[in-house]
Structures are given as C-alpha cells and as structure tokens.
C-alpha cells in the first residue's frame, strides 16, 4: 500500500519524497514494501518481503520490544517513536515510526508501518519555525490575504501600520478602513494582481488618517502551490517616508532654484519663490522685500524693526487668498520692537509650530495680528532673505488647511530655500540697478523723441533688446542744419552692453560734429569710417570688434530733395501723401570700420507731407532671419499705420506693437519724419558778376525783397550783411556770386562763390583798415557759417525777423 503526496520543506516549493510505508503480518514478516521505503533504506522489496521486520532494527533492545508485541495486533496496540534502522549499505538511519494494527483484505491481522527520516522531519520543523519567526519578526509590515481578499494573517509591523488599537483586520476584506494606509489603493492593487498574476512592486502609497504624512512602498504578489493554484496573496510595505521627504526637499529646492534663476526681475523672483512654496510646503505664503531692493538699491542697515519698510511682493495662492490678509503691494505699518522680529533681522529663521506659540508671539500686539495671521492659521515659519549681511526681505509660510504642523525639518528647508532665493533676489537687484543706469545712460545719449522744425516734424522710438533685458548701440538722431535743412540719422553699433552704448555715444557725437561742418552725406560717412577704425585700435582687448552701420540723410525743404548715404544700413522708406510706400534705392557702402571702400550718395525728390522712415535692422530682422521679408513686412505696416493724417506717435507705437509681444532679439530704433516745404514765395535768388558794382546791386535787391516781405525793420542789418559778404566774394573769390534769401522762422542769407577758401574770423587792430567784415557779421546775426559746395562754398547767416535795438550800438 504505497502512499505519496507533496511535502513542502523549507518553503522552497520543491517536491520532497513521501513517507515510506510497509505492511507487517502478525508474525512480524514484511509483506509489502513501498518504493519510498526502498529509497529510505536502500533495500528493494524482493530482499525485504518475507523476512522478519525486526532484522532491520540495529539495537537488540528494539528487536526484543518488537518481538514482544508482534502476536497481539488484534489488541489494537498503537506505537509511535523513533528507532534506529539499518541501511542496506550498513550505516544507521534514525526514522520516526507510526505503527498501527491493521487487517488486510483477507482478514489477516498485522501492522501498517509509516516511516520518515528523522532528519527531514527536524529540518522541516526548523524551517517552519524560521518561516514563522521571519513572518512575525520581520520589521516591515507583511499581510497575507486569501483569494477573496480577506486578511488571514498579519505580522506585528503590519498590525501597527494598517490599523489602530482595537481595530483588528483578520477576517475583514481589504477594502475595510485600515486607518493608516489608503485602503482603496490596497484593494485595487490586490484585485489587479489576483486577476493578472503580475506582481506590483514598489508602488508608492500615501498614508491616511493620522499617518497621512507617511509614505509606503507597496509590493503585492500571488501565493500559489506547485500546480499554480491560487492559495492567497501577500502584501509587503516598506516605509519610504524619509526618502520621500528628502526627494521632496530636493525637488522643492530644484524648483525654487529653477524659478529664481529664470529671471532677473526682482518682483518676479519673489513671486516664483511664493509659487514654489504653495502648496508644496504650506497653504499660504508671501515674500516681502525692502522698497530699496525693488528700486535696485541696497536695503538700509536695519537698526530696529520700526525701520523696516517691506512691501509684500509675491503671494500665493493667487486665487483664494485669505480674506482680510494684505495682498501683493501692501506695506505694513511701523512694527514694534519684538524678539521674533529682531531674530529675523539678525538672519535667523523663526518657527511657531502650533497655535499656542502663535498666540504667545502675538500677545500684546493683537492690533497687528490681522496683517500677518491668516484665517485658520495654526503653524508658521518666517525666514529672512539674508545676503551679504543685509536683510533684503522676508518669506513667510503658513499652514491653514492641513492639520500637520511645521517641524524643524520644514524650517531647515525654508532656511535653505530662503538663502538661495536671497542670492537670486540680490542678483536681480544688482542687475536692476546696473540695467537702470545703463538704460538711463543710453536714453540720455539719444536725442529728444519729438522735434518740430520748418523742415520736418519728427518722432523717434527706441526699444531695447529682450524687452529691456539688454541695452545696445542702436540710435537715431535729428540734427537741424543751416538754411532750414535737417539731417536724419540712424545707426547700429555691433554688440550689446555698456561697451556698445559707449561706442554709440562717441559715434553720435562725431556725427553731430561732422554735421556741423555741413559735409555731404557720403563725405561724412568717410570721416566716420576713419573714426571707427581708430576706435578699433583703441579697443581695450585685442581682437575686440568695433563696427557699426549708419545711414545719414539730409532733407532740404527749399528744394524738397533728400540726399542719403548708407554704411551697411537698411534703406530708408518713404510714405507718400497718397499712402503709397517705397524703399529708396541706394548703393550702401560697407560697414563702418572696414575701410578702403567709398560711399555713394543718392538724391531723391520728396513731396511735402511725405514721411521718411529710417530704422535699425532690429525692426526688420525677426525670427525668420530674412531681411527681405522683414522689409516687405515693414513696408506693409507703414502703409497701414502711417497713412495720411495719422499722428507720428500713434503710427510708431502701433507699428512696434504689430511686430509681436515676444522680446526682440536686437535693439530697435525707428525715426519717422513728416517733411515740410518752404514755399517758393519765401525764397529769392540772384546772381552777380565779380564786379565792385555788384555790391550795390545786391544790397538793392535784398532791400527790395525784404520790403516785399514786410521785413523793413531788418533791412538795414541785412544790407550790411549782404554788403560785407558780397564784397568779400568779389574781392577774394571771383564770380559769379550768388545771393539767396530764405524767409522762415528766421531770415537766412546765403552768398555763393567759386572759391574753396574758408573765411576766418579775426579781431582787427585799431590801426587796420580792413578785417572787420566777418566780425561785424558775427555781431549782427545770431549765427553764421560756411559750407563747401561742389563748385565752391556758401557763406550763410541767420537773423531774427525783428530788429534787435542792441545791434545799433556795436563796439566796432
């Protein structure tokens, strides 16, 4: 009667040999011998069957005891014990025997014998004890559930982790309230593993109830027999709270650092910090900064909290801000001398973990509580933004909704975040100060945005790169020239920063100086190119690039012509009075500083009321990096926004807004000039031969024209000026001699001659017979000068339209 079945020893799940069985008749002869018995003692059945069973016993006492009871099987004697049996190879095998009286199918009496190796039994007992100890003493929670998801067994750690006192889980389903762990997640994972057979490992599960700040790593797997039949499920829990807190701390610091370093705006930096703190660390937070910090200056050395002038800049949450609590922009009143405030002023972080400590801190100053304590606030941390020994501001975090109070670990975290934020705020503050100074410097170097002259009405616009993040070397200028002409300038220095701004200032000054010499545009750019080459030689670092583009245009309201020359600069655009827009075709020369190449001037007619637009490349160079497309885009928008009757200010602002909200990659400078004309009736021109008689003729012609214009009161002065200038031309330059009078807001007198010799003002001695002409002219006019022409030179003067009585008493 062999018996078989699986035995699980040591928890390995491997099949072990079954117990050995034999049948011994009433006289002690072995009649049946199982294969397991053969495996246990080494004897095959043919060698054992028919022989006395006692022959297998090794000790004499055991044999005698067995012989004494072999004749009484019917008495129902049972025997269990351990005996030593002889193995076929001679060694001793200790076995555990179970002897039972039994009759076979023919009614013969005997005994059934069940034997097992004592060593295997002892090993299995040890394994079971070790497994029981492992289950009960394992420090992490282990829960065993049956196939119906009912708790069957919990070790001690699981009982503490899953349920509170007096709330046993044995026999209850997994969806029961475990008090300490999210039961819905547990039940969902168990069903998933039971149905799919796939284990779920290292799933992060939050605690619940009083343990909701705790985090567990949950692993779930099935328990099966060797035939893969489901016996139950096992769940293990590992407490990962400390690791999650450390990860949260690192994540919070990373987010704070990323937000703080993403901007150089002081207020935005404060808001980024507040946004990181809520809801990750607290429920309500604000960042307050000193007023001086917001302006880019250092905060005052705080002699006491009463001197604090902190403006609440960044607040969170933006939506749902507590009612009655001062929001962004609020400035608290003078604060009392309080120990907590002194601690913050000394760079220390203050922790008030519970409501009692908050109440104790507010005692005696309840009138200020509504400024700092939100509704339901019960725990708070306040840390200073402390950098370079100065308190730039404070950051305050409250817990109002979540019940868990702040701990020292939270205070340490906020201290570190505030320390990093303070560096970011200080960097932003210093950038604000430097940028403000640089922008102020650059704007001071630019001319007035609006000018109004007889030649044109102008409006200038400047936008720094990056929406104000960088300053550069773009500029525009409007330079009034003699004879009512006006010069329109646009330039762009290579690079950004103070170096580019300083170079721009030097170039603008040079253009103003060269313009005063009344050079032609191409000649002026040639001189400017020489200056840029000199600046390259003076660069503080060898290899520094100093270069610029420039466009110089001169508009003459008398002839209604404009002459333009370009050094690598985009062409000007002209918006005609009928609304059409065209680009001026010219031949741009190289960038300033290249040298060795000529510049060419182009002259074109301009109808009165037209708008001349000069600009820098930042206006047309956008993300597509296509200057031709940018020029077409600018042309279309000028036609749309700068049509007839549109104010230049409105047209320029709409044009710049139409370029998009994204910060420009380069500076943008734009100058719009609406041209005017001096009517032909306000000009008079004559030409005289180089003859002494021409002086009298010129005086007579000038007097007659002034009488026609109703300017008789300035006739005497003008005749003196004309007489001196024509006399000098006839005497020193030859003919022909041209005379032109122009009436505008002043009276302009011009005398042309073919000589290239410039007149020179000098003071004549009392004995000299001549040399007082130019001195006399300088006294009779408001200003005078001379410019070269292609066929000689022109001397010009300007006079007011009304006589000055002081001019009649001149110290000649």
Image (cartoon, rainbow, N blue to C red):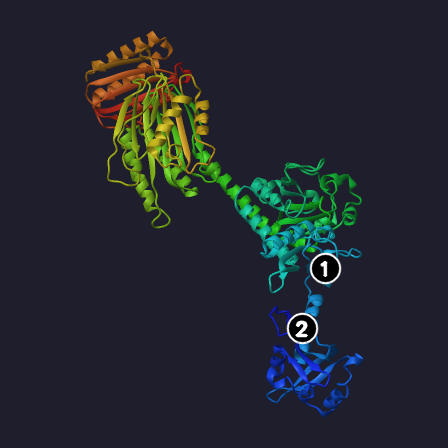
**Mark 2: which secondary structure?**
helix
Compared with 346, 270 (above or below) is above
Q: Nearer the viewer, residue 262 or 288?
A: 262
Task: Name the residue carrying label 1.
Answer: 152
Compared with 214, 392 (above or below) is above
Answer yes or no: do the residues labelled 1 and 2 have beta carbons within 8 Å? no
Q: Is residue 481 visible?
A: no
Compared with 311, 141 (above or below) is below
Q: Nearer the viewer, residue 368 or 85?
A: 85
Q: Is residue 545 left or right of residue 692?
A: right
Q: Nearer the viewer, residue 313 or 249?
A: 249
Label 1, label 2: how many angstroms apart (C-alpha)? 21 Å
Give residue 42's quadrant in the image. Answer: bottom right
Give residue 308's quadrant in the image. Answer: top right
Q: Position of residue 563 (x, y in %)?
A: 29, 25
Categorize mark 2 by other alpha carbons within 10 Å: few (<14), some (14-19), many (20+). some
**Mark 1: which secondary structure?**
strand
Q: Is residue 681 visible?
A: yes
Q: Which residue does the image show at 42% across and 24% down from the upper left?
A: 451
Q: Farthest residue to the bottom: give it.
A: 60
Q: Position of residue 199 (x, y in %)?
A: 59, 57
Give residue 760's quadrant in the image. Answer: top left
Compared with 265, 655 (above or below) is above
Give me the disc on residue 127: 2
Which quadrant of the figure contains the N terminus? Answer: bottom right
Q: Position of residue 769 (x, y in %)?
A: 26, 23
Which quadrant of the figure contains the C terminus? Answer: top left
Nearer-N-terminus badge (1/2): 2
Q: Which residue does the image show at 74% across and 81% down from the upper left?
A: 81
């Amino acid at each position: 009667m062999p018996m078989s079945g699986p035995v699980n020893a040591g928890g390995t799940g491997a099949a072990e040999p079954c117990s050995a069985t034999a049948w011994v008749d009433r006289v002690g002869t072995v009649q049946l011998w199982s294969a397991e018995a053969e495996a246990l003692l080494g004897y095959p059945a043919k060698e054992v069957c028919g022989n006395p069973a006692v022959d297998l016993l090794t000790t004499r006492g055991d044999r005698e005891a067995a012989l004494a009871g072999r004749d009484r099987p019917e008495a129902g004697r049972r025997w269990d014990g351990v005996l030593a049996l002889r193995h076929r190879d001679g060694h001793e095998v200790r076995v555990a025997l179970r002897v039972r009286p039994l009759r076979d199918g023919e009614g013969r009496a005997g005994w059934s014998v069940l034997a097992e190796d004592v060593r295997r039994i002892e090993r299995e007992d040890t394994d079971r004890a070790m497994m029981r100890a492992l289950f009960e003493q394992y420090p992490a929670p282990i829960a065993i559930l049956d196939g119906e998801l009912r708790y069957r067994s919990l070790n001690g750690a699981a009982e503490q982790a899953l349920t509170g006192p007096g709330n046993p889980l044995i026999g209850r389903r997994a969806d029961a309230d475990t008090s300490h762990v999210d039961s819905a997640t547990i039940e969902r994972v168990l069903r998933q593993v039971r149905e799919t057979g796939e284990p779920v490992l290292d799933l992060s599960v939050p605690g619940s109830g009083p343990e909701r700040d705790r985090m567990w790593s949950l692993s779930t797997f099935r328990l099966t027999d060797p035939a893969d039949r489901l016996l139950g499920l096992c769940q293990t829990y590992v407490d990962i709270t400390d690791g999650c807190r450390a990860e949260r701390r690192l994540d919070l610091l990373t987010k704070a650092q990323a937000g703080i370093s993403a901007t150089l705006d002081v207020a935005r930096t404060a808001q980024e910090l507040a946004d990181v703190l809520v809801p990750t660390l607290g429920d309500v937070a604000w960042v307050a900064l000193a007023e001086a910090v917001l302006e880019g200056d250092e905060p005052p050395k705080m002699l006491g909290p009463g001197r604090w002038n902190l403006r609440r800049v960044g607040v969170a949450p933006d939506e749902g801000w507590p009612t009655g609590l001062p929001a962004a922009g609020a400035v608290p009143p003078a604060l009392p001398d309080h120990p907590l405030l002194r601690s913050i002023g000394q760079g220390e972080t203050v922790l008030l973990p519970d409501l009692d400590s908050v109440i104790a801190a507010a005692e005696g100053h309840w009138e200020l509580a509504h400024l700092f304590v939100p509704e339901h606030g019960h725990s708070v941390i306040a840390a200073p933004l402390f950098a370079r020994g100065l308190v730039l501001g404070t950051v305050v975090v409250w817990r109002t909704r979540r019940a868990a109070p702040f701990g020292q670990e939270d205070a340490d975290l906020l201290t570190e975040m505030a320390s990093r934020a303070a560096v970011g705020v200080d960097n932003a503050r210093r950038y604000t100060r430097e940028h403000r100074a640089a922008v102020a410097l650059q704007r001071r170097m630019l001319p007035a945005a609006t000018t109004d002259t007889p030649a044109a009405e102008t409006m200038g616009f400047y936008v720094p790169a990056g929406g104000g993040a960088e300053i550069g070397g773009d500029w525009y200028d409007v330079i009034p020239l003699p004879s009512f002409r006006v010069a329109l300038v646009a330039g762009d220095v290579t690079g950004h920063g103070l170096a580019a701004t300083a170079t721009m200032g030097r170039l603008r000054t040079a253009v103003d100086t060269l313009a005063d010499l009344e050079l032609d545009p191409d000649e002026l750019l040639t001189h400017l190119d020489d200056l840029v080459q000199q600046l390259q030689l003076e660069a503080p670092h060898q290899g520094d690039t100093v270069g610029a583009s420039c466009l110089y245009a001169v508009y003459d309201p008398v002839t209604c012509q404009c002459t333009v020359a370009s050094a690598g600069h985009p062409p000007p655009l002209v918006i005609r009075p009928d609304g059409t827009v065209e680009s001026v075709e010219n031949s741009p020369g190289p960038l300033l500083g290249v040298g060795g190449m000529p510049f060419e001037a182009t002259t074109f007619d301009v109808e009165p009321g037209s708008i001349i637009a000069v600009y820098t490349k930042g206006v047309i160079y956008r993300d597509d990096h296509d200057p031709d497309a940018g020029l077409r885009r600018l042309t279309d928008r000028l036609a749309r926004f700068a049509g007839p009757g549109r104010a230049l200010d409105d047209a320029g602002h709409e044009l710049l807004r139409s370029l998009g909200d994204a910060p420009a990659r380069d500076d943008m400078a734009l100058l719009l000039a609406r041209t005017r004309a001096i009517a032909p009736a306000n000009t008079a021109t004559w030409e005289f031969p180089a003859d002494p008689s021409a002086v009298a003729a010129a005086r007579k012609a000038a007097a007659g024209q002034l009488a026609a214009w109703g300017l008789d009161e300035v006739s005497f002065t003008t005749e003196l000026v004309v007489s001196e200038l024509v006399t000098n031309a006839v005497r020193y330059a030859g003919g022909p001699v041209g005379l032109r009078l122009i009436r505008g807001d002043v009276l302009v007198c011009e005398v042309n001659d073919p000589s290239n010799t410039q007149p020179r003002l000098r003071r004549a001695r009392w004995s000299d017979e001549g040399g007082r002409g130019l001195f006399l002219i300088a006294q009779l006019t408001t200003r005078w000068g001379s410019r070269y022409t292609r066929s000689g030179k022109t001397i010009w003067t300007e006079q007011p339209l009304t006589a000055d009585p002081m001019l009649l008493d001149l110290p000649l």
